[in-house]
Each structure stands twice: as structure tokens, then as C-alpha cells.
Image (spheres, grey):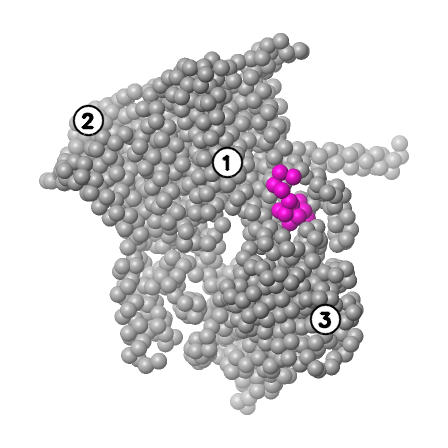
Amino acid sequence: MANEQIKEATPMIEVRNINKAFPGVQALDNVSVKFLPGEVHAVVGENGAGKSTLMKIMAGAYKPDSGEIFFQGEEVQMNHPVQAQNLGVAIIYQEFNLLPERTVAQNIYLGREPSKFGVINPPQLNKQTEDVLKELGVAKMINPTALVSTLSVAEQQLVEIAKAVSLNAKVLIMDEPTASLTSTEVNLLFDLVATLKARGLAVIFISHRLSEVFGIADMITVLKDGQLVGTKNISDVTTEDVVYMMVGRTLDHYFPPLGVDEDFGEVVLRVVNGENDFLSNINLDLRKGEILGIAGLQGSGRTELAQALFGAVPFDEGEIELMGKTIAIKNPYTAIQRKMGFVTEDRKSEGLALMQPIRDNMLLAIRSLQNLLSFIHPDGIKTSRSMVPELGQQVDVRVDSYGKQAQDLSGGNQQKVVLSKWLASGAEVFIFDEPTRGIDVEAKARIHDIIRGLTKSGVAVLMVSSELPEVIGMSDRILVMHEGKIGGELPAGSSEADIMLVATGQQNGNNKNKTAAKDGGIQ
Amino acid sequence: MSVDTMTQVEDKRNKNSFWKNIPQVYYFLVVVLVGGLILDQFVASGNILANPSILFNILVRSVALGIVAVGQTFVMLGASIDLSVAYTISFTAVMSSLIMQGDPARVPLAIAIVIGFGILVGLINGMLITKLNVNSFIATLGTGLIVKGVLNGMFSSGSLGSVPKGFQTLGYGSLGPIPYSIILLFAIVVIGWFILSWTKFGSHLYGVGGDLLIGRLSGLRTSRVLTIAHIISSLTAVVAGLFIVSRLGAGNPTVGPDGVYDLESVATTVIGGTALSGGRGGVFGTIAGVVIFGIIDTVFNQLGVDTYLKMVIRGALIIFAVASYSVRSKREAA
Amino acid sequence: MTTTEKNTKSNQSLAVLKKIWAWIRKIQPVYPIFIVVAIGVSQLNENFATVNGIMAFIRRAAPLIILAMGQMFVLASGGFDLSQGSVVTLTIIGSSLIIYNNEEYTYIAIAIMIGFGIVIGLVNGFVVAYLKVPSLIATLGMLLLVRGGGLYWTGGAPKGYLSEAYRFIGRGYIENVPLIGRFPMSGVVLLVVALILIILFHKTNLGKQILAIGDNAQAAKLSGVKVRQIRMIAFVISAVCSIIGGILLGGYGGSSYTAGQGMEMQSVSAAVIGGVLLLGGKGSVYDVIFGALSLEMIVSFLNLLGLPKPYRDAVQGLIIISAVAYAGLRTKKRD
């Protein structure tokens, strides 16, 4: 009888048949999940699986295309984050929503300051804050009058949680809460989560760190490519089960064939003992004609590695050898001059000047290399007047005029434009960070073909990606990052599970000797 | 962690926070003061800053600027700017003087009208910025020009109207040893401080200026908050205008631009540590900035330093001060 | 005609109309504004539309046009140059002092002034690009520095006179030009400067990189653009333009120490009317030229209407607000 009662408990929040599409990609496909009060529910899945989108829908930041949301059994429409907040859904994003120049108390009670006739009562403000902190058991760690900018990341997170609690949140959603915490801080966080759970909140969190998930969660939901794979009791599954649920999918397209030994030339890029604030002990070789895939969990240092190689966030220690010459790459200009190109993670904020015409974006890098006073030709540069249409063809940009603003293009076309920028500048070493993120299938395939085509002409490619099929389908060798270091190297054709196990720290890589299927196939 | 270590951590925090909370500008103020004293000793045998009437002068001259700067602090905290203050001051001076016509009975009427005017200008500024999304620099510049145009169009230059003797006590009288002007400034600063630190509005203003998005997510009525800040700024300009006219005895359309109140109020606010980007700073810093300018002005005046060299020093000071605050941040400025 | 034929015909005309409308929408608003105001002014003043009138107008408008073009370089890179007006004043009173009515010193004065311009621009650029001071504050500081420095140097009252040779640049005419009769010297300077700036901005890498910086400084940096150096160059161009504008204005109006005050606001207005976005990333020298011309014509128009000078200020205020509001509505950078 008791069991049945538990089964019938009303979910604190529930989503049913949620669909959400963005241009070119179906982020959520008919997802239904129940989140019960007094439960810690983890949501896991690969990048692009739809986790963030789902959370944002529940927090009122996005509206679903179809489907319903139920809060405490009643259907609700979440039109605005404030509305969700009023209902009792609190969300803590990875980038905290705190005002650094204001105190802890001021941040927590922004908009709801205890006041009479418009005058705030500071002692009461601070006391209320302290009460909330006491409830969470962290009153001794955080001073309500401390400026948020003086707090560590972990402490700021505590403030965010305190804010949620003060809002009488019934649902607390946390996006990768442990990404920047030390293990002691993680333990503290988990104690806190246990407290909240005891108060009857429904705690939902997104995480990649499976060991942690298994340490704290009661339920686990796995999403894959926008679809629900399953919701299970944590006691019914093992880490490996979950990993296998997360990965393993039918290919939606075939990748171009991997390279063979004859294709690979001499080492063009070598890093010896590279180190900075985010990375340590980085040693790698990149050969001409190969694609070196960089995999790893979020926060493992993938992007930081790319940024260090390109000089955007340089190494402090160690050496870089480019084409046999030891050089210091301390800014992007040096890297570009030495024929490197960097297709960044976020094309809109780092890769394109959105208001400028497509052609100017394409020629941006090569023009930077040329003399400031060089004359420009609308469709090209000094040495090649028809560069733009040629580039357009090379990358297969589908557009009727190169004079259109870059912001008018689809994601796939935008990415192609970014790519063409480096083709124009004659890059011989390409670094890609999430080359096909947020791009439709057809454009994805095209970009993959182009990348492989590059290697055939002697270009060396380093490709950071969180999409495992892409890593496996494209890489001739795979380096797996783990907590700022290279966790291991895996050969071409390794399975997703192989990669994930190294990435989650379950296994130390370096299975160079392991034979793997030669056709790069998965499933 | 044992309970003991935790309390130790807490204690350390409390000790540091007092020193950390003093706005950086006060270190500059000390430097300027000391510099002034040294110059004083060497060049004027210590006769300048020790002279009470000169010290007096510094404060009084700073009053008008200080009042306006408090208002400017409000809008700048909201990540905005108010360039219409100079002309609002002029308009107030002329309008009030003309209405008063030397008749003490008409003083309340004059004050009511100019206050109404100030509210109107602030309201217009606020609406332009929040509803029409006009850049605050342009919007307030534009309204300033409009006020200037109307003012110069309606009135010829030169002294206009007259202020009754009674009203002039504001400018010249004292309550015991303390001049009313200082009391006025003090009152404005205290009121300003109170609003910023003790009211919901103040808290919301910091929120809106610090990060508009966070403000919205917290349910703040961002347009309303910013518009009120602009109204406050215009009202301080009105008060400054009334003060000025009480000292001059009659209004004159050029008082606003002559005193460069627009640029100087921005400068003192920025030197005082209020960031152009909003969300950070306060009136105490601004007042220190005003006093710094005042000291420099007066000391240099007494030393016979050319007015124009003073302008040069001001310009250099602004750049230097802001550069030292900005060098910390890593953003790409424009 | 049968109904179907009628329908096809109206469909065709509709399509044509749509095409024309799309083409019209692409035109920068400054051109229709220019035409409308030009017509308005010539209605009120028959002389305006004559060759002589146009020449006189060009002579008067040249300084502002040059300043506006310089300001555009800075605006397009995402900044503001508030120091333009005081640089103009410095040029005029400084030149007067150096020349002091001696013809021989004319060219030395000009050379020295241009040198000043380069230095001022470099300092502005350095403070903004390397010291990370917001350009509003940096150029504000420079405004005070230059105004104070200039007035101090000349002792506060205009001393000296500008030589005839100097004044010729700003107010003289070249005679016996075929077809038009006479052409203002300042117009010649304007044409030369405009030509150089058009080439720099529209035909060389410099312009494209400036636009990239104003549009997305981070993306520009990651594409190898030397953001800091180029920002400095933009400020130098703006300062030198201010100097040249000052030389023309000095010639036209004579030595005076209030000349130039407020011109930076006018140049920003002209640029905004010419479609420049205040946050950067968009600009065209051609459009700015017409923006400045339009602004000058509006001033003339108001003059001719008999509107007293003060009200002209008010109208200017209205214009600049409307221009920015309209520009904001028209081009929104999508998130």
C-alpha cells in the first residue's frame, strides 16, 4: 500500500510531450518527465541532447512549441522567468545572475527588499539573509554584508541557492553546479542538496560527472538527441549502464572515410608541457594531413586547449613548436601569421561581425595580414579579385548575394563563412571548436566533407567537439581531456563508451594498442 | 572544519570590510590635499589652506557643482548620463529670478514653477531613453539644446529679473558659523545617500545599472527606475540653479554653460568612482571628487595659476583617475 | 480583357511596385532628407540654387563636413571623439599666435598644428585602447586639456592675426574656373580630404577593419585585426580632421576664441543623420558628407525662416534626437 502511495505522489513539476525546435535542429522531441518533491533528480546526456533547453522551458525562459507543463498537478503556462519564479521554480545557471558590486543580502532580496514606505530596513535585510543562510547551514561561511565580487565561485553558488530558498522555491534547477568546485566544495553542496531535499523541494540538476550523480541523485533521466531515453531509479542502474544509454545512436549521416597512414605527414604542431591557469601537463603532436579529435566533458579544458594553441588565452609555461620552429604564441595575430586558423565555439560572438557583409567576414583574416593601406576589391583582395565567389563555392555557402549581412544567414551557412575566412588566409593548421554545433544535418555533412578535404591537401586539423559521433566519425586519433589534463589517447574508431569512460575519469586512457573497427563505424 | 576556524574566518572578514569600503577616490583626495599643503608651504608660506576664508571659498564654490553632481551620480549609477543639466540650471536661474521680481511673496511660486520644469525635463529625458531607446548621451544632449534654444529665444542675455534680499540669504547667510549653502549641500548629499543606500528605489537603481537583464529577471520596473533617476538629476539641477541665483542676485542665461556644469558633474562623479557603465559607486565618492576639484581650483587661484592651466590639470586628472580605475578591468573599451 | 488577364496584369504591376519599394527602402534616409531640405532652402532663398549660392554654401559647410568625416572614423570603431571642438579652437587661436600677421609663418603654423593634431589623436587613442578608459571620458578629458592648454598658451584673448595666405584657404575663391566661375578654396581642401578619406575607408583594409572592430571587437581580434593600433589610427584621423577643419574655419571666420565650441556635437549629429550607428560597425563617408550638408542646410533653412538663432539650437536638438531614434528603430542588431 505504501509503495502505491509513493507512486501516486503528485510531481512538483512535470513536463508532458514537450517539443521545441530551433532553426535547423529539433532540440526536444516529445519529452515527458516527472519530478517529484523531496527527490534529487539528475538529467544527463550529451551536448545537444536537450538538457538545457528542457530546464529553460521549465524556468519560463523558453516557450515549448507544444506540450504541457504541470506544476503541483495543475497545468501552467510559463511565459516569463519572473512568472516561473513566482510559482516557485528557481534556476541557477552556470553563469550566475548576481550583481558583483552589491552585497549578498542585496542580491538575494533584489526587488523584494523588506521595507516600509519605500525605506529599506538594513538590519532586517541582513537578518533575513542570515536566517536563510542559517537554514542552509552556511551562515558561518558567508557574511550577508559581503560584496559578491569578494566571494569565491562556490560561495557565490551558495548565494544563488540561498536566493532560491528565500523565494520559497519548490523546484530548484541547477545547471552543472559542480563544474567549478573543488571536491570539498562539492561535498558541501551535496550536504545542502540533502537539506533541501528534506524540506520537500524537487531538486533537478544537469551534470556530466557521473560519479557525483551517483553520489547524490535519487532518480536519473537520460536524454539523447532531444529524446527521452529513460528515467530510472538510481539504484537500478550502474554508471556503465548510464553511459551506454547516453551514447550509441544510429548515424544520421555517414562521415567521410578516415585517413590512412600514408596521408599523415610530419609533425607540424607540437606542444611540450603546456600549462596555464586552466591546463596542465599538455603534451601533444599534430601531424600534417590528420584530424586530431579532442573530446572530454564540459569544463575539462577542451576549449581552453584550443584557445591556448591559438594565443587567445595563451600558455604560461611550456613550448610550442610550429613547423619545427619554437615560437611563443601570445596573441591571435602571431598564430594567424603562422598560418593557423581558429573556428571558435561561438560563431556569433567570436567568429563573425554580424552587421558586415558576408564577403567582408570571409576576407577579415587575410586582410588583417595584409598592409592596412592595401586596396580592397569588393570580391577579393589585392592578389585575387574573384576570391569571394571562389571561397563561397569551396565551402558551399548557399546565398544569393555576398553583400548580405552575416546575421541573415542560417547557422550552417554562417559556420561555412567562418571556415572560408581561414581558407582565405591560407591556414595550414586549423583548430575547430564545436564545428557543427547548432547546425542542420545537411550542412553538418557538408562541413565534415570540407574538413576531411582540407586534410587531403595537407592541412592539419585539431578538432574539439562534445558530439561523440562527430569525434569518432572524424578523428584519426582522439585525445580525451579530463580536468585540465590529457586523460588519455585513443585510436580511431574507439567507441563512445571508451571515450566517455576516460572522460569521466573511470578509466585511464592510452589504449593505443587497442584495435578498433577500421570503418569508423558506430552501431 | 572546526567551529573555531569558521569563526576566525568570519572575524577577519568584518575587520577588512571597513577599509575596503572607502571609495578609492579618498586616497586621491588625501594626495591632493597633501600636495596642496606642500605647495602652500613652499610657495605661500602656508597661508592658503590655513586661511579659513579661503577654505570657506572652496566649499562654497563647490556647492553648486556638488548639488548637480549628486544628481548626475544617480543617472550614472543607472548606466546613463545627463548632459542637459547646464541648461536646466540656466533656465531655473532666469525663470525664478523673473518670477520673483524682487518680491519675497512670489518666492514660493517661483520655486514651484521651476521644480515643475525640472520634473518635466527629467521625465522627457527618461521617456526618450527608456521608451524610444535613444542613446542617453544624445537624448540628454538634445533636450539640453532644446532648453537652451527656448531659453535664449525667449530672453535676451544679461541679468534678468531680480531676487529678493530675503532669498539671497540662502547664498550668503549662515546658521551660526556654518553657511546655509554648506547646509544645503550637506542636506542634498545626505538625502542622496539615504535614497541610494536605504530605499528600495536606490537598491533597484543599482540593479538596473549593474545589469539590466538581472534587473528584469528580478521583476524590477527598469523604465520607471531610470526615469525617476533622470527626474532626480534634473531636480538637483534646479536646486543648484536656485542656489546660484541666490548668490548672483539675478538670473542670467549663461550661468549653466559658463560653469561647465554638465561636463564637470560627469567628471567629478567619474573621479569619485562611479562607473560610467553603472551599478557601482555613490555620492560620497562624488563629493570627494567635487572637493578635489575645489581644492585644486582654490589653491591654484591663490597661487595665481592661470585659469587655463587649471583646466589642463582637470583634464589630465580625469583621464588619470579613470585610467587607474579601469586598468583593473579587462574589457575592450570603446 | 478577361478577368484572368486583368488579374495577371494587376499581379504584375504589384510585383513591380514591390520591387520599387524594396529598392527605395535600401536608400539611406539621408539622401531624401538632403533633397527635401535643399528644395526647402532654395524656395526661401532664390540665390541658394544659383551657382554662386552653392559655392558660398560649400565654403561655409566645408569645416563641418571634414570634422564629421573624421568623427565617423571614430564612431564606426565604436567610440566617441568629444575633443574635436576644442581642437578646432586650438588650431585657430594657436595659428593666430604663431603667425602674428607674418605671412612667412603661414606654412610653419599649419605644419605645427597638424603635428599637434597627430599627437592629440595618438594620446586619445592610447588612453582609450591601452588604458581602457571609455572614449567618452577620455576625449572629455582631452577636451579640457586642449581647451585649457590652448587658452593658456594664447593668454585667453585672441592674440595676433591670421595671415592673408592662411585666410585664403578658408575664405578665398579660385577664379576663372570654367563653367562655374569661381570655386571656394575650402571646397578644394574638402575635395582632397574627402578623396583621401573615401579611399582610406572604402577602398583599403583600414576601413574594413575599423568596421569589424566596431561591430565585434572580440571577433576582430580573433581574426588577427590589431584592434588597439587601429583604434589609435581612427582617433588620429579624427584629430587631424579637426585641425584641418579649424584651419578652414579660422580662414572663414577669423580669429576668435569661441569658434569651434560645440562642433563635436554637430559632427556627431551630422554623422548620425548620415546613418552612422553610435555603437559602431556601420558608416559611409559619402553618407556622412550628405549628413553634414543636410545639417548645414537645415541651419540655413531655419535662418531664412527668420527663426532667431536660439530656436535653431532647439531644433538642432530635436533633429539629433529624432535621427538617433529613427536609426535605432531602423537597424536593430539581432541577438
Give the amino acid type for the residue marked by disc 1 in the picture. Answer: Val
Query: What span is colored magenta in the figure?
Result: A360-374
Quarter of the picture containing the N terminus of chain B is bottom left
Q: Which mark is residue C172?
A: none
Callout 2 secondary element: loop
Dot 3 surroundings within 10 Å: few (below 14), some, or many (20 or more)? many
Q: Amino acid at mark 2?
A: Pro
What x and y, as percent, mark residue B46? 14, 39
**Percent position (x, y) of residue A493?**
73, 76
* Neighbour tally class for label 1: few under 14, some 14-19, many 20 plus, Cα within 10 Å: many
- Name the residue that disc number 1 marks: C236
Mark 2 and mark 3 on one chain: no
Give the main secondary structure, helix, strand or loop, of the magenta stretch: helix
Quadrant in the picture for residue B231: top left
State which chain disc 1 sits on.
C
| Residue B215 percent location from the top left of the image | 44, 55
The residue shown at (25%, 31%) is B305
Indicate yes or no whether the magenta region holds residue A371: yes
Side of B150 where A69 appears, left or right: right
What is the number of the mark on residue A476? 3
Regarding residue A354, the answer to whether it shows in the image is no
Q: Chain of mark 2?
A: B
Is A413 placed left or right of B237 in the picture?
right
Q: Is residue B215 above or below residue A359?
A: below
Asked whether disc 2 touches disc 3, contact meaning CB atoms under 8 Å apart, the reply is: no
